[in-house]
Amino acid sequence: MNEGDLERSARAVGDPVVVLGPKGAGPITPGQFAEWVERSGIRLVPRSWHPVSARLMVVEEDATWPASPKPTRVATVFRVGAARKAGATEKVTAALRLPDLRSALELAYVCREMAATE
């Protein structure tokens, strides 16, 4: 993503990938995800990693955008899902960006508990 490789960005996510950010939430296609990467120009520098479960990880990041080069600290809940095709690699099936680490960890723990009680 940070290198602007749109094909690689699209290949890294599931179909669909669930996203959450300041402009909304919902499922999008890998192509739409790559378009967002290009349109936003976002760059994310990881600062800390917080495993929540085998499939959930919270990553605290410094985010920058072309119009706002001063870093803003954010945190993203990532969910990794099993590949649908045999021999395929796992994909990011959710990327839920929140304004701070505490909010992201709270959401991740709720997601973990919901999955455990299905």
Image (cartoon, rainbow, N blue to C red):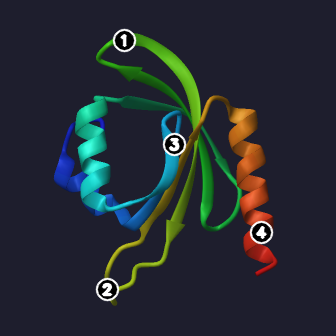
Expressed as whole percent of the image width and height from the top left, the position of residue 85 reads: 33, 87
Residue at 77% across / 55% down in the picture?
109
Residue at which label 1 appears:
69
Distance from the alpha carbon under mark 2 to that under mark 1: 40 Å
Residue at which label 2 appears:
87
Residue at 24% across / 45% down in the picture?
35
Kind of element beneath mark 2: loop
Residue contact at pointers 2 and 3, CB within 8 angstroms: no
Residue at which label 4 appears:
114
Distance from the alpha carbon under mark 1 to that under mark 4: 37 Å
Kind of element beneath mark 4: helix
Q: Quadrant of the C terminus?
A: bottom right
Q: Amino acid at mark 2?
A: Gly
Let me know if residue 12 appears in the view.
yes
Choose top left, top right, bottom left or bottom right for residue 14.
bottom left
Label 2 or label 1, whichever comes before in sequence order: 1
Horizontal side of residue 101 vs 37, given as left or right: right
Label 3 or label 1, whichever comes before in sequence order: 3
Q: Quadrant of the N terminus?
A: top left
Distance from the alpha carbon under mark 2 to that under mark 3: 33 Å
Expressed as whole percent of the image width and height from the top left, the position of residue 2 reads: 30, 35
Expressed as whole percent of the image width and height from the top left, the position of residue 20 reads: 53, 46
Let me know if residue 19 appears in the view.
no
- Specify few, some or many for label 3: CA neighbours under 10 Å numbering under 14, 14-19, or 20 or more: few
Horizontal side of residue 37 vs 96, given as left or right: left
Q: Amino acid at mark 4?
A: Met
- Specify few, some or many for label 2: CA neighbours under 10 Å numbering under 14, 14-19, or 20 or more: few
- Specify few, some or many for label 4: CA neighbours under 10 Å numbering under 14, 14-19, or 20 or more: few
Residue at 42% across / 31% down in the picture?
44
